[in-house]
Image: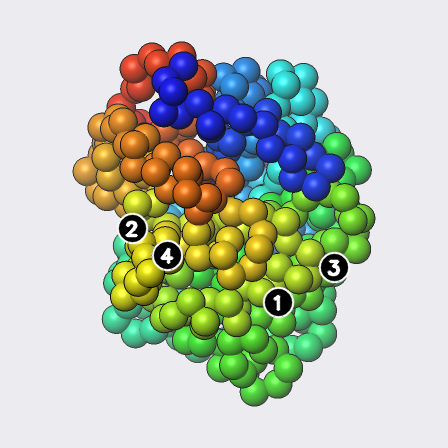
Amino acid sequence: MSHLIAPLFEPLQIGSLHVKNRIVMAPMTRNFCPDGVPGDNVAAYYRRRAEGETGLIITEGVGIDHPSALGEAGIGESDLPHLYGEAALAGWRRVVEQVQGAGGKIFPQLWHQGVMRLQGTGPNPNAPSSRPSGVWGPAGGLTSSPDDYVTAQSVPTVPMTDSQIADVIAAYARSAGHAKALGFDGIAIHGAHGYLIDTFLWEVTNRRTDRWGGDRGARSRFAVEVVKAIRAAVGPQMPILFRFSQWKQQDFKARLAMTPVELQEILLPIAEAGVDVFDASVRYFDRAEFPEVGGVDAGLNLAGWAKKLTGRMTMTVGGVGLNNGMYDSRKQGKAQASDNFELLMKRFGRGEFDLVGVGRSLLQDPKWAYKARVGQAFEPFSNESLSVLT
């Protein structure tokens, strides 16, 4: 093993959970679950990553038990999994057994698409999509979503009512309870990328004047209540990971916070509600989040700031092992393997984050973590891996 990356193979204790190394499979939508049910092929897909020495696996986004949780969201999603119903729960039980049988740990990523869901799609096409203020996003934002989708989504709708908000929070708790009963090792919450939780955090899409809107702390209330409900459902010991982002699919240039103080106002209430780990989603891990900040904090990335401001563990992600970001590789059709470990380990060594999320590299090569440990060459990424379960 390279001395440089040896620290990534040290174990970590997250609450009651022991993780054998710091490499995490980041959540990636796959579309291989007809009727929302993961089959044996999905179980084998995740098992191979555990066999390949990935320390922790976070599943693709899994729809919570709410009618408008899933649908098409700009890129034609169809066979998305959910975490309710006898068949789906049985499928996820097989996934958990396969991963844990191979020595791995696994969290489901609980997901509600919110404003991104196209009305009239998904398992419950008649259910209205859930929007905090009826707004999809800003006009003219930098997005990769198709023009016809953006045009359709830009039509304002009715804001969520208090009772609808309560229903969604209860749905998160129900699905988290299902996950615990199935034997999952923890819970991951998708609070990023312009989906439902994120649109409560974002002032562009949360224009409410009641208790669910207002300043940054008030806009965090929905996320806080979701975390509290999940914590109540799974108990005090089960780890909870929360993914957040500055950028949104509606606008890649969007920002929740312009300064560290603003970021703390958003994240600290969520941390105190019961989060153990923040998953800071960026497109490139090696970029300073607030470049204007100097001193000992100069150059911290988003995960580094989340850790400093909340005191919680964090995970970094964004181009680890590759030479470009997700949307760039999608456009170019590929990404070359990159030994960017020196940049990664410089940040890891100064304590910016505790876990390293690996996405497309693990999508292409289930043995990526093993190859990193023994020093074998990595495979390049190709868009072809998006359409198959390797």
Identified at 40% across, 25% down, the residue is: 5
Label 2 to label 1, Cα distance in Å? 25 Å
Using a 10 Å C-alpha cutoff, classify the residue at mark 2 as few (fewer than 14 neighbours), some (14 to 19) or many (20 or more).
some
Q: Is residue 242 left or right of residue 336?
A: right
For residue 161, which quarter of the picture?
Answer: bottom right
User: Which quadrant is home to the N terminus?
Assistant: top left
Above or below: residue 166 compared with residue 282:
below
Numbered tag placed on residue 269 in the rendering? 1
Comparing labels 4 and 3, the label whose residue is closer to the camera: 4
Above or below: residue 367 compared with residue 126:
above
Q: Secondary structure at mark 2?
A: loop
Numbered tag placed on residue 305 in the rendering? none
Label 2 to label 3, Cα distance in Å? 34 Å
Residue 340 on image: x %, y %: 28, 32
Q: Secondary structure at mark 4?
A: helix
Label 1 to label 4, Cα distance in Å? 25 Å
Numbered tag placed on residue 296 in the rendering? 4
For residue 271, which quarter of the picture?
Answer: bottom right
